[in-house]
Image (spheres, helix red, strand yellow):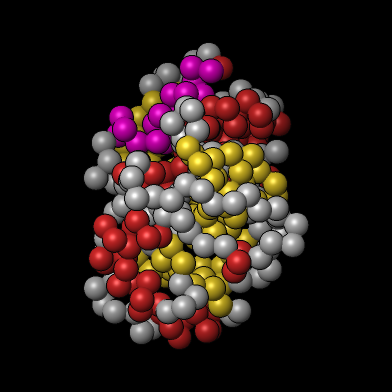
Amino acid sequence: MSARADGAAMCPRWWPAPAKLNLFLHVLGRREDGFHDLQTLFQLLDWGDEIHVEVTADPRIERVAGPASIAPESDLVVRAALALQRATGVERGARLRVRKRIPTGGGLGGGSSDAATVLRVLNRLWGTNLEPGQLGRIGLALGSDVPVFLAGSSAWAEGRGERLTPVELPDTWYLIVHPGVAVATAGIFQAPELTRNSRLVTMRGFSPAEGGNDCEAVVRARYPEVAAALEWLGRRARLSGTGSCVFAPFGAAAEAERVAARVPDEWASFVARGVNRSPLDAALAIIA
């Protein structure tokens, strides 16, 4: 048996797909391709979804378990596997199961992270061995947040979010509150009231506390549940991306947990630690 086959045989059956936060989000302008030029700082978390991947000799791609609210053929895990299959011509398939914890439409990158995990894992298990740049092009076609999860590092991001500079962020714990609604990204970016004229800032010497989320005013106005969660969480509260989840940073887990204990019962909440490297990296290292 080859070293690769040995590694695949010993690999974990469930693979992490971490959530992310946008510590700030500036919208600089609309592009000719319909997307927007952005600046943001992605913080990866030690919490997220899990993807079970089973390689098959049959070339079919199947999602055999996953969120009932998302049709299998529309799920980004299926679309990612099919995209990799088409790009490489590999004749094997996969059976995928999704253990979903990241809320849909929450701004935490759940679908994008799931897609990135499938791309990275199948690139190893199928032996397709695409370079990071090649995987990145496949990922960007699936969604603007996919590249940061493929890169596996908290990062300063520009362009659509694909021009990434890895960063080392201080050890921070976050309380994330989900007020029970899903926000569609397209609707926020198409909103006529969205401001698109933030000035370009440089990474050097910039603190996330100096920035804001240009999409927050639109989301607040359209989703009163999100506005209420932001007000409850207080002056340090931020909106993540274009979603419904709001968060606040803390220096220690115990501080975050004390506030989490007071979150109103009608909202979901969790405490997660910010990480500079994706937990998927450590999982993949055993089959390197």
Tell me the quarter of the image containing the N terminus.
Answer: top right
Q: Position of residue 258 (x, y in %)?
A: 45, 86
In the rendered image of this protein, does residue 95 appear above or below residue 47? Answer: above
Visible residue check, residue 82: yes
Tell me the quarter of the image containing the C terminus.
Answer: top right
**Main secondary structure type of the part rendered in magenta:** helix
Q: Residue at 66%, 53% (x, y): give it.
A: 201
Q: Position of residue 194 (x, y in %)?
A: 39, 50
Q: Residue at 52%, 62% (x, y): give it.
A: 212
In the rendered image of this protein, does residue 180 appear above or below residue 195? Answer: below
* Residue stretch rendered in magenta on the structure: 72-87
In the rendered image of this protein, does residue 70 appear above or below residue 240? Answer: above
Q: Residue at 42%, 79% (x, y): give it.
A: 234
Q: Residue at 49%, 20% (x, y): give it.
A: 85
Q: Is residue 33 magenta?
A: no
For the residue pair 239 and 59, the one nearer the viewer reads as 239
Residue 88 picture quarter: top right
